[in-house]
Image (tube, rainbow, N blue to C red):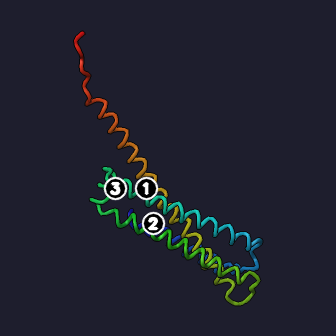
Amino acid sequence: MRIIERTYPYIISIILGFIIYIFRLEINDIKNFKEILSAIVTFSAIIIAFLSTMVSIFISLTNSEVMKNINEAGGNGLLTSYIAETVIGGLFLVVFSIILFIFLDYKGNFSNLLVVIYISLFSFVIFSSYRILKISLKILTNVLNESSSDKTENKAVKPKINEAP
């Protein structure tokens, strides 16, 4: 199961890129490509900022039981790599989008290859973002459950002191 979790963003990206390559989709075939490029740059920036914020939240949760369990199970390296892969993929997507602005009117031999790379990068960022978001939500849910169980335990442990009148 973990192998699927690790590889599905790559596999889906490669499959989508292959499909685009087979159908010979080129830059000039995509309507409003300039607006799409701008929107994807904005989307990537939002994802990168969100992940950066999430890292700071994870750092603040290092003393929680959930994070201790993740560390003991060796999941901290995996969690870090998932975040890094998504951020790096997002940065590559932004840079490649900027490069594609140069080729907006390009109709040469490499137009299909540029679209294949772009769709593959975009799908990778989407699916790796989904993966880390899903994991982050599980961690957050566990931390919140841990926090609410601590409050319940604290209420049950505190004895009431009866004072004599």
Residue drawn at x 69%, y 84% as measured from the top left = 111
Residue drawn at x 23%, y 15% as measured from the top left = 163
- Whole-percent x and y of residue 83? 45, 66
Q: Would you call the spot at circle 3 few (<14 residues within 10 Å), some (14-19), or many (20 or more)?
A: few
**Image position of 154 with respect to 57: above or below:** above
In this image, 50 relative to 69: left or right?
right
Residue 12 versus residue 36: which sits nearer the camera?
Answer: 36
The alpha-carbon separation of the residues under discs 3 and 1 comes to 9 Å
Question: What quarter of the picture does the N terminus occupy?
Answer: bottom left
Residue matched to label 1: 57
In this image, 21 relative to 84: left or right?
right
Mark 2 falls on what kind of element? helix
Q: Which mark, residue 83?
A: 2
* Dot 1 amino acid type: Ile
Residue matched to label 3: 62
Classify residue 124 by image quadrant: bottom right
> Which residue, as the protein is rendered here, is positioned at the far top?
165
Q: Would you call the spot at circle 1 few (<14 residues within 10 Å), some (14-19), or many (20 or more)?
A: few
Residue 12 versus residue 71: which sits nearer the camera?
Answer: 71
**Image position of 157 with respect to 59: above or below:** above
> Which residue, as the protein is rendered here, is positioned at the far left?
164
* Dot 2 amino acid type: Ile
The alpha-carbon separation of the residues under discs 2 and 3 comes to 16 Å
1 or 2: tag closer to the N-terminus: 1
